[in-house]
Amino acid sequence: FAINMDQLQLDEELGKGNYGTVKKVLHKPTNVAMAMKEIRLELEEAKLNAIIMELDILHRAVAPEIVEFYGAFFIESCVYYCMEYMDAGSLDKLLGAGVPEDVLGRVASSMVKGLKFLKDELQIIHRDVKPTNVLVNRKGQIKLCDFGVSGQLEKSLAKTNIGCQSYMAPERIKGESQNNLGTYTVSSDVWSLGLSMIELAIGQYPYPPETYSNVFAQLTAIVHGDPPGLPEDKYSEDARDWVSKCLIKTPERRATYTELLAHPFLEADSKREVDMIGWVKDALAHREQQHDLVTATLVPPLASLS
Ligand code: ATP
Ligand code: MG
């Protein structure tokens, strides 16, 4: 059955991206909490219909590592996209100063399994692998969202800025500057995966904007500099080797999903218990605490005002 706006009760805002807003909603007929993404487009109805049809493939994207798709509809020139609500939000907001190796391993294996599923079962390249597109819930599950299924939607998004945090592989950055869009392959997602792992480990984007005078300098570092690696003091040889195989600058030499799954780092993950529920709980509590600290310093106690 199809979802429409009348069935939804709007709840709080979950976040904003470059192209739209994500809200928590309640689907009244089924009592299921969902996340609804609103994407504003300037398009005629025919194109919007094409987008909705292309999005339909998402109903087949059912796997433990993929955020479930419930349906999409449009009103005026907005596409509304309803998906599984992930109650711990995206990874970028749970990092703190970096995650321990066993959690890193579990996230890595979930992401590789999800990406491999998309490629093998649906012939989909994700195209936007980054921590904000990796969602987490209190059951400790890690799932991917926002992969590129609709070529029509992709074309309609106003891609005005590359953004100051580029997870694009070197070959893509070079390709875009030559206006050559044919250079995107699965291995470009592997680069973005490696970069996301480093961000998880150190708690920040590996090419921090403060280090570069502008976006051009930052992109130059990605294309011409040595790739970043995991910190030596905190992670095992296996973990560091795994990430370095994602961040090989020549796309043909980068590891494949099959190789990444067979690597000792993920082999070890498959054999151990990881307390993901405990990690999520602590990460949320820590975030809550940071939030309280910020508000406490911004809002003076009432007593001091009188
Ligand atoms: P970009 O626009 O560059 O892709 P983004 O991924 O942060 O950036 P959105 O996809 O619009 O932008 O998402 C905005 C925020 O909403 C995310 O960062 C995430 O924290 C939150 N969010 C998105 N989808 C869900 C969901 N299914 N459940 C819970 N929170 C979500
Ligand atoms: Mg997103």
Image (spheres, rainbow, N blue to C red):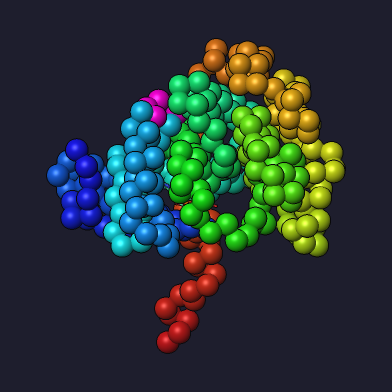
Q: Is residue 71 visible?
A: yes
x and y percentages locating residue 119 in the rendered image? 52, 25
x and y percentages locating residue 76 in the rendered image? 31, 62
Q: Is residue 262 above or below residue 89?
A: above
224 vs 8, left or right, is right
Task: Tell me which segment is drawn in magenta.
Answer: 61-65
Residue 248 covered by magenta stretch? no
Q: Nearer the viewer, residue 250 or 291?
A: 250
User: Which quadrant: the C terminus?
Assistant: bottom left
Q: Measuring 54% from the left and 15% from the top, which residue is drawn there? A: 270
Q: Nearer the viewer, residue 20 or 263?
A: 20
x and y percentages locating residue 299 in the rendered image? 48, 74
306 vs 163, left or right, is left
**Principal SS element in the magenta part?**
loop
Q: Residue furthest bottom?
A: 306
198 vs 16, left or right, is right
Q: Nearer the viewer, residue 10 or 171?
A: 171
Residue 253 occupies quadrant: top right
User: Which quadrant: the N terminus?
Assistant: top left
Q: Measuring 38% from the left and 46% from the top, which residue is drawn there? A: 51
Q: Measuring 74% from the left and 39% from the top, which residue is drawn there? A: 171
x and y percentages locating residue 28 in the rendered image? 17, 48
Q: Is residue 199 visible?
A: no
Residue 107 occupies quadrant: top right
- Total marks shown come to 0
280 vs 264, left or right, is left
Q: Measuring 78% from the left and 33% from the top, which residue is drawn there? A: 249
